[in-house]
């Protein structure tokens, strides 16, 4: 290889390395700055310090909260008021990751809310996906979607006699059946086409699968008070099953 050609290749490689290093350094600085701004905005929620959010929000800002409600900038700022008397809280950022493309940053982060609710301590986690744009006046938040991190409810204890009331074979269709058996404080549901699932009691007649807090299994009763079926409920929608018979006892 000719010396001049070799020198040119080496120069291009070094230039690429330098450019990548500068880009990484810039991204790191921007990530630190965005995290600082985000925490400043979270600190402003409890006291209802709307001017802080007003300063950082893009004029055409769009916000979707954990309930799916969509608000623009004016609507969002209008609802940013101090916590009512008896409530004391704060929110702290936990995980924080930013991805950059041109003058746009997409930020995914997790936060922990600490709330004293009339003397009772509540701990709630949220995740947020934010879109920021770099403007001559600095970073501005153009879009945000916040979601609560769901947790399993506390399980209760039910007597063996109460749990045995749910034992039986249940049918969704003529071909799809599930057998439910009680034992060790829980219910086990088995379908021919699926692995067995374990259900813990939340309250009488309502059960949940640990690790799946979005859904519930709710047992129904007839006029005689006996269990006659159940519904699988998710997001307010029910799938109904009918009880056919008690399982064979060993």
Image (tube, rainbow, N blue to C red):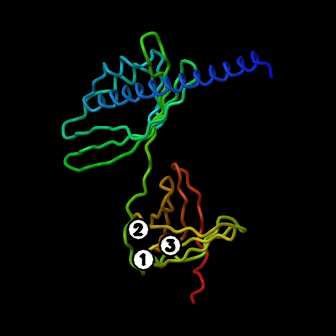
Residue drawn at (53%, 52%) of the image? 234
User: How much space separates mark 2 and mark 3, taking CA atoms?
Assistant: 12 Å
Residue drawn at (56%, 74%) of the image? 180
Mark number displayed over residue 162: 1
Which of disc 3 and disc 2 is earlier in sequence?
3
- In the rendered view, does 208 fall on the left or right side of 85? right
Residue 48 position in % (x across, y down):
27, 27
Q: Residue furthest front?
A: 3
The part of the image, by quadrant, that contains residue 88 is top left
Q: Residue furthest top?
A: 136
Mark toward the viewer: 2 or 3: 3
Which of disc 1 and disc 2 is earlier in sequence?
1
User: How much space separates mark 2 and mark 1, taking CA atoms?
Assistant: 8 Å
Foreground: 79 or 104? 104
Which of disc 3 and disc 1 is earlier in sequence?
1
Q: Residue furthest bottom?
A: 250
Could you tell me which secondary element the residue under label 2 belongs to? loop
Q: Are marks 2 and 1 in contact (CB under 8 Å)?
A: yes
Crowding near pointer 3: few (<14 within 10 Å), some, many (20+)? Answer: many
Could you tell me which secondary element the residue under label 1 belongs to? helix
Mark number displayed over residue 204: 2
Crowding near pointer 2: few (<14 within 10 Å), some, many (20+)? Answer: few
Crowding near pointer 1: few (<14 within 10 Å), some, many (20+)? Answer: few
Could you tell me which secondary element the residue under label 3 belongs to? strand
Q: Which residue is mark 3?
A: 187
Determine whether 57 is above or below 172 in the image: above
Residue 133 position in % (x across, y down):
50, 19
Residue 182 position in % (x across, y down):
50, 77
């Amino acid at each position: 290889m000719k010396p001049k050609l070799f020198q040119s290749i080496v120069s291009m490689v070094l230039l690429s390395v330098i450019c990548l290093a500068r880009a990484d350094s810039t991204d790191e600085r921007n990530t630190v700055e965005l995290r600082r701004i985000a925490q400043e905005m979270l600190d402003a929620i409890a006291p209802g310090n709307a001017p802080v959010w007003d300063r950082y929000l893009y004029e055409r800002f769009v916000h979707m909260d954990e309930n799916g409600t969509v608000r623009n900038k004016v609507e969002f700022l209008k609802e940013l008021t101090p916590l009512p008397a008896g409530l004391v809280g704060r929110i702290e950022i936990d995980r924080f990751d930013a991805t950059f493309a041109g003058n746009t940053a997409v930020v995914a982060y997790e936060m922990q809310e600490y709330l004293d609710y009339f003397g009772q301590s509540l701990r709630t986690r949220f995740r947020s996906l934010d879109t920021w744009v770099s403007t001559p006046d600095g970073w501005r938040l153009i879009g945000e979607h916040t979601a609560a991190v769901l947790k399993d409810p506390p399980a209760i204890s039910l007597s063996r006699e109460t749990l045995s009331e749910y034992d039986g074979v249940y049918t969704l269709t003529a071909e799809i059946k599930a057998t439910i058996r009680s034992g060790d404080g829980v219910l086990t549901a088995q379908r021919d086409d699926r692995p067995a699932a374990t259900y813990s009691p939340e309250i009488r007649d309502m059960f949940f699968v640990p690790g799946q807090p979005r859904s519930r299994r709710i047992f129904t009763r007839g006029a005689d008070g006996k269990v006659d079926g159940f519904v699988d409920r998710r997001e307010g929608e029910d799938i109904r099953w009918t009880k056919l018979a008690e399982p064979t006892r060993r």
